[in-house]
Image (spheres, rainbow, N blue to C red):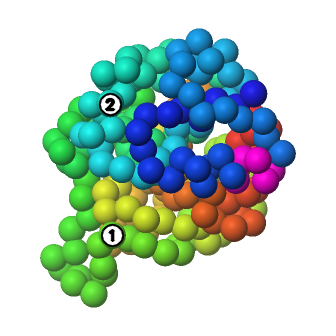
Amino acid sequence: MIAVIKYNAGNVFSVLCALRRVGAECVLTDDRDTILTADKVIFPGVGEASTAMSYLREKGLDEVIKSVKSPLLGICIGLQVMCRHSEEGNVDGIGIFDTVVRRFDNSACREMKIPHMGWNTIQRLGDCWLSESFEDAYVYYVHSYYAELCSHTVATTDYITKFSASLQRDNFYATQFHPEKSGSVGEAVLKQFLAL
């Protein structure tokens, strides 16, 4: 069973549909025991970091997420709030990944629009959970904030600056891009995560 964390974020329905398309049995939940006993956990969403963290703390889900022992995949805002701190709302995150989430600064290149929205490529950094076949693959982004490069960065994308497209630490994985909106490449990413 795949537990998809319910925490008042947007775009969760798209993730549930994508998981069902690849044949995964999944449930949307904020129940501690369900999350901690799931075979895999997905922490998706679109939203604002300080609002997301406020809800997670109110429900105790920040501590639940840190306690997960099975593979956990954070997507978009899921990746961002798993970081140490976010400039969006000036909020401390869960701290799984020791990096800061910053707002894109296009003051030196006004033609680069914010949010970063649309298709862009990813570049792997050595061995990581993402298959070599994803090197230079196009994936879909919608974000105004990004995680800085750090020791947990396993793939990058370049838009205004080079940023963490994917992070990995122990059983925690994350993508800034949206696998559920990235066509056949995104479907392959989800299948690869589910096969871990």
Looking at the figure, which quarter contains the N terminus?
A: top right
Q: For this rendering, which residue is in front, 151 or 10?
A: 10
Q: For this rendering, which residue is in front, 25 or 142?
A: 25
Q: Residue at x 79, y 53 (%)?
A: 21
Q: Residue at x 32, y 30 (%)?
A: 55
Q: Which mark is residue 14?
A: none
Horizontal side of residue 91 vs 174, given as left or right:
left
Magenta residues span: 18-22
Question: What distance separates the C-alpha of mark 1 from that of mark 2?
Answer: 24 Å
Disc 2 designates what residue?
Answer: 55
Label 1 neighbour load within 10 Å: few <14, some 14-19, many 20+: few
Q: For this rendering, which residue is in front, 31 or 93?
A: 31
Label 2 amino acid? Tyr
Q: Which mark is residue 115?
A: 1
- Residue 177 placement (x, y as % from top left): 52, 58
- For the stretch drawn in magenta, the main secondary structure is helix
- Residue 86 placement (x, y as % from top left): 25, 43
The quadrant in which residue 136 appears is bottom right
* Residue 79 shows in the view: no
Task: Reply above or below: 135 against 169.
Answer: below
- Residue 142 placement (x, y as % from top left): 43, 65
* Residue 113 shows in the view: yes
Q: Residue at x 83, y 45 (%)?
A: 23
Q: Residue at x 26, y 64 (%)?
A: 104
Task: Reply above or below: 64 against 148.
Answer: above
Say if the magenta span includes residue 167: no
Label 1 amino acid? Pro
- Residue 184 placement (x, y as % from top left): 75, 66
Q: Secondary structure at mark 2?
A: helix
Label 2 neighbour load within 10 Å: few <14, some 14-19, many 20+: some
